[in-house]
Amino acid sequence: MKKKLSYRDKLVELAYIYDVKEIKEYEKRRKNLTSGQLELILKKNKIIIPKDYKSNFLRDNFVKPITKIKSNFEEYKDEKIKEKNRLFRKAENFKHDSKRKFNNVLKVIWNNLGKAGLNFLNIIPKLGTAIFVFFARVFTDLFNGIYNQQIDPSKARNVIISIFAVIVFSVVAFGSLNYFKDKDFKEIVEIKEPKVEKKLEPQVKIKKPEVKKEVKKPDVKKEVKPKLEVKRNNVDEVILPNLNLKTETVLNLFKDVEYDLGQVRSQKLVKPIYFTQFPRDLDELQSTKLKKETFIKIVLPLIVAENERILADREKLTTLANKKFTTDLEKQWIRQKLLEYKVKKGNLKELLVRMDIIPTSIALAQAAKESGWGTSRFALEGNAIFGQWTWSGQGIAPLDRESNKSHKILKFPILRASVKAYQNNLNTHKSYIKFREKRKKLREKNNNIKGLELTETLNNYAQTGLEYTKILNQIIRQNRLTDFEPVRLVNSVKKVELSS
């Protein structure tokens, strides 16, 4: 029987086969080299060690069983995970099935109610016909009885006289009752009128000298009673000049023009009332809900107006791009828009990508976040709704700005200029390329751009990054700003004058 050689003996035998002198000399001197040393010498002499040499007792009896146990454990673990996933799927399926069954039950109930209602409506004509036939028969029988009955002349005379007497008595009683009521009312009015005059006379006499002494009252009248400047473009617009308006005056204005956010949400129309600035005392409103509604009412028409201007330009650009020949004025307009949207090399496709709306929900949310719902120092002093930075233009220095920084918050003459600059910023700056690309994909899919699908691309707008986009989503959802995305301007609006 052939003796089973160890791994070391196999390496020595391999050295003798290839005539490795170094190993032979060590063997002659009876210096026992280890397996690792033998491997190094063989590799140094470029001798390949067969793979079956490396199988040894340790690997066969310990390593392989342990590896097998480990693989079995992994399989067991995977199986458990699969079972867990199956349970989760069953639970989800049960949830969806229950929801679907519940919806089906509601649908069946609703259909049955509809059928019952239709049956009831179908019964009404039949019921009306039956009632009509019943009363027709009753009256027919009654008049036939009257016609066929023999009338006694003396009795008929008495009946006619009694009926006439009742009518005359009723007319006299009703007329006298109205006469006495009118008389009482006149007496009350005549008695109360002189009392009111007597009370008012001394008050007017006392207050007249006080009005003359006060200096501020005529100034207030001058500020509160200006007439609104009315522009006529495509629609009638109401533009409020710089009046340092108070919030109370603004709220009264909204009542006068019947400006209600509930109607805007339902009708999807807003009146073009353009404020040039926020009221200074907006933050003094105690009701947070009223403060937010007032802010939205002021900013919403500005955003919608700018979006409609962009859509009109976009439609015009599409028409001109499809024309074979354009006039000089049309070419000049295209060059102007290429400069406005910072598009190089006359690329009209890129211009069309940039020339698009900013969803109203995003614009309102960012305006609310950056301006503190219209109460920040930047919004009140510089009409800066969106907190845009500048290093060269006119601006307001932040109070908490670090000493090594020189940026300012860009200020504007009117609120609408801030909205226009904000939209141009998102449509042109390289930081918002992802925003424009995703908007383009949404436009190509269904021509419906939704704000909540674009907020994640605005993480570069603020230093807080993803946290900033989460706040925007929260503002949009809590205040239902997506309701304003399809809102458009109405075609006309009343002329309004501010009153004190």
Image: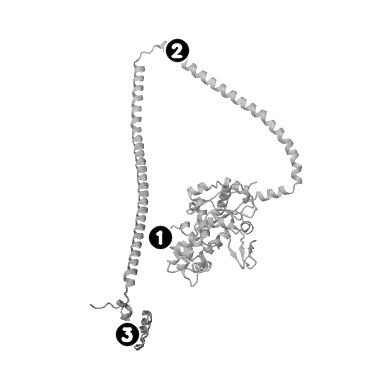
- The type of colouring in the image is one colour
Amino acid type, residue under disc 3 in the picture? Ala
* Residue occupying image coordinates x 74% and y 41%: 207
Q: Look at the numbered disc 1 and give the secondary structure of its residue.
A: helix
Label whose residue precedes the other's in the sequence (1 or 3) = 3
The residue nearer to you, when weighing 1 against 231, is: 1
Residue 227 visible from this viewpoint: no
Hey, which residue is sitting farthest front in the picture?
Answer: 30
Residue that label 1 marks: 445
Residue 229 appears at what percent x and percent y?
61, 53
| Secondary structure category for the residue under label 3 | helix
Give the residue type that dot 1 points to: Lys
Residue that numbered label 3 is attached to: 15
Tag 2 secondary structure: helix
Q: Quadrant of residue 116?
A: top left
Query: Is mark 3 in CB contact (under 8 Å) with mark 2?
Result: no
Q: Is residue 40 above or below residue 272?
A: below
Alpha carbon of mark 3 to alpha carbon of mark 2: how far? 155 Å
Report, in whole angstroms, how far the alpha carbon at label 1 lies from the one at label 3. Answer: 73 Å
**Between disc 3 and disc 2, whose residue precedes?**
3
Query: Residue 261 vs residue 17: left or right?
Result: right
Mark 1 to mark 2 CA distance (whole Å): 89 Å
Q: Nearer the viewer, mark 3 or mark 2?
A: 3
Position of residue 125 in the picture relative to residue 450 (left or right): left
Q: Residue at x 54, y 50 (%)?
A: 493
The residue nearer to you, when weighing 136 against 467, is 467
Residue 155 lies, in percent from the top left, at 42, 11
Question: What is the quadrant of the N terminus in the image?
Answer: bottom left
Q: Which residue is mark 2?
A: 158
352 up-or-down from 56: above or below? above
